[in-house]
Image (cartoon, coloured by chain):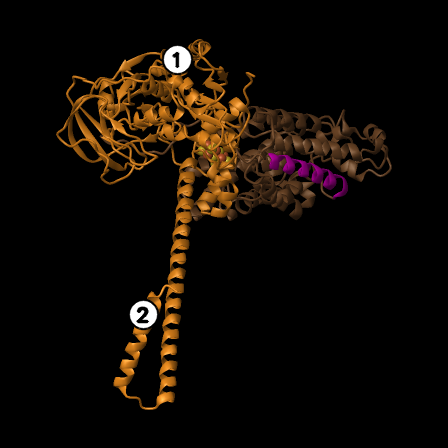
Chain colours: A brown, B orange
Amino acid sequence: MSFLRITSPHGHGPMTTTQVMQMVLLATLPGVAALTWFFGPGTLINIAFGGALALACEYLVLRLRNREPTPYLKDYSVLVTSTLLCIALPPYAPWWLVMTGILAAVILGKHVFGGLGYNPFNPAMVGYVVLLISFPLQMSSWQAPRGLGDMPGLSEALTALFLPATYDGVTMATPLDLLRQNKGLLMEDLYQQTPQFGQWAGVGWEWVNIAFLAGGLWLIYRGIFTWHAPLAMLVMLGLCAAIGFDSGSSESGGSPLLHWLSGATMFGAFFIITDPVSGATSNRGRLLFGALVGILLYLIRVHGNYPDAVAFAVLILNFAAPFIDQYTQPTTYGHRPIKEDDE
Amino acid sequence: MNTVFGIHGGIHPPEEKALSNPGTILDAGIPPTLVLPLSQHIGKPSNLEVGVGEHVLGGQLLAAADGLVSVPLHAPTSGTVTAIEPRPVPHPSGMENICLELSCDGRAQWLDTSGFANWTEEKPEVLVEAIRAAGIAGMGGAGFPTAVKLLAPQRAPMHTLIINGTECEPYITADDTLMQVEAACIVEGAEILAHILGVERILFGVEDNKPAALAAMKAAADGAGRPCEVMAFPTKYPSGGEKQLIEILTGKQVPTGGLPADLGIVCQNPGTAVAVRDAICDGKPLTDRLVTLTGRALARPGNYRVRLGTPIEYLLQVAGFEPKENRRLIHGGPMMGFALESSSVPVVKTTNCILVPTEQELPTPPPAQACIRCGLCAEACPASLLPQQLYWYARARDQEQLERHHLSDCIECGACSWVCPSHIPLVQYYRAAKGMIADSKAEKVRSDRSRGRFEARQERLEHETAAREAQRAARRAAAQKKAAEGGAEDPVAAAIARAKAKKEAAANESDPS
Ligand code: SF4
Ligand code: SF4
């Protein structure tokens, strides 16, 4: 009788790409829940609307590229991209903003380069930066957190999305905005005079960051990515902040804690720079990649003109990733320099 | 002293060891016919000692070794030689080799043999010769002739012998069983090997998932005449790779492109140690081995003593094969074994396992998805390679980058493919890429050589032409000179003068002065 000829190995581990993507989606839940609690259902609406758009867009592009769409749609990767982008968007964004972002992410960020696995840039961040450059105003108006302004309900969220002209929400400067605009106040006074700063790093923001941190730690625990890039980024960001803190003077760049727990820090550290496709390849490379993101993030936050800097920092380093790879190849077995030793 | 070292990467696939009931040896019996591959080379070997129709006894020499990296072949039982012709042999490519077919008479009549009464007093060369004559080849990996490995001390002194009882491949329990049942023989075989190699210490490496084997080996090693250490280490695939085991036990890495012997280390398999003991103490050639027959498509899995040359289809019957649930037949383990297309091939010296899984047990892999560069493969690679990069460059056929990323250090363990969530058959790409590089290197050698030949020929031709030219020019010059001297000379006189001159020249030549 004749048997199947398959090359070794004949067994396979339990993990599939679909599961990897599902776990990443699952791990965003705590962060999304925190965003929803502090800023209302806007983010949820973005994610649902953006996800539907992304699936449709992926389907059409695959058709145009003459691929059978089903297996690709089943890998969930496009949902991960759209979800990450929508988390980064301001809640209560108008539909055209979400749509432009999704189209840019899926088409410019991914398919132009040949699809999943071939994209040199993080697709979600491509979408985000396109929006930031094209619509700076809409991209920097952020809903006031719970307790400091009225919470929009579901119907208001839908209005904001589909009939943006009739929606009038309460927006408020984020702690990072305030920090950048700060002229002359000591850090202590800044915290006391502006209610947005909350306990550590901003009302709402601190909990949102802690929630993303929790989701990220779970992914590391499940072996979806390694700790190297996130840790390196957080350490470098903290180090830069410690140096720039200037004992809390009016010139201060903010404390490490403020930087760790505000804006998109934790989201970026665990969900953006860990994107394996556009990041560095080896663990050594990831350390370097993360560390450089941390430094850039700090510099752009403190000296740049944008509300947050994760997207820019990540895209710039996506450029550098191939070079980082060149110089951070791990030492292969048997290539260790031979040292004179005992025996 | 007893510390073990960690290695990079590795995976923990389901072990499935209990399925084949380690610790018990069953007898597969004598099949009606045995099929014995004569050599690794296609073509009729010149070293046959028997002919078709001849009756042979068990242990009788059938074919002598031809050359250094070859081993002789002995009859695994008594019977009649019925054919010498090409037959399929176990090989990933499904290739054929010249095989000798032996119709067994079932009487199992053996030649009388005897070994050395006291091997400790024999010279290493004598023992190596006996091992070569017994046809012993490595029974774990590639089947390299054991006697050749034992020549290592000729290059540099050896200090450590490692007996590799790791058996990290899932399913296989042949070495585990051997260690449980024949620990004393393994230790004695190891002592013989140590004596030949002149090493000071013997290390037995065993994964900690084999407590019974560990206990048996420890007890046996206690009675040994030289420093023996049985070292247990955490179970992880592929700890049993020769290079990995050396790092685990000694903390040292075999330099790339080198051999364990470069570190003063020789590795052998427990089965080989027993074969060495049998050859030296009893004069018995290697004619059988332990084979794990396992997988859920078998009703009676277990460790069977199998005569070399036994057709695998016969073994499947013995172990109660149920064909309907199965689509694959694997020679070796699930991680590194290769799939056989047909069960008509025979058991050879390296057949440690025949795995016959059901489709549920080891499902046919789904189509590969895109590489998401998740890096799980790099985390799993025991050689600290970047499998995702190698995959990328293998697809691009970028030889330079493949070499820069050390493709040649890949041991083809399959850990990367096992973890890859996109089900990419990575190892398949690496094998193809290695083949491509080997081909282009061979091509380069060939073209260098033929360029060399061409240049040499060119040079020779030029030389010859130049020489002819010179001769012609000299002749022309002489003729002109003569013409100038004597004008129109009498041709007869000229001929006489030439003949005279020749004679004179001959006389001068024979003159010793
Ligand atoms: S495990 Fe597979 S998908 Fe992940 S990086 Fe390696 S080859 Fe790519
Ligand atoms: S097959 Fe090669 S690349 Fe893959 S894990 Fe094993 S050694 Fe590494």
Q: What element carries label 1?
A: helix
Which amino acid is tagged 2?
Ala
- Circle 1 marks a residue in which chain? B
Badge number at residue B506: 2
Report x, y in % for residue B293. 30, 20
Q: Which of B125 and B268 is in front in this view?
A: B125
Q: Is the magenta stretch mostly helix, strand or loop?
A: helix
> Neighbour class for label 2 at 10 Å: few (<14), some, many (≥20)?
few
Instruction: Name the side, left or right, on which A239 lies relative to B480.
Output: right
Mark 2 and mark 1 lie on one chain; the one further toward the N terminus is 1
As rendered, which of B348 and B125 lies closer to the eye? B125
Q: Specify the amino acid type for callout 1.
A: Ala
User: Residue at image x 36%, y 34%?
Assistant: A7
Where in the figure is residue A186, as x and y percent of width and height?
86, 32
Density class for disc 1 (Cα within 10 Å; few <14, some 14-19, many ≥20) is many
- What's the magenta region? A284-304
x, y (%) of residue A158?
A: 59, 35
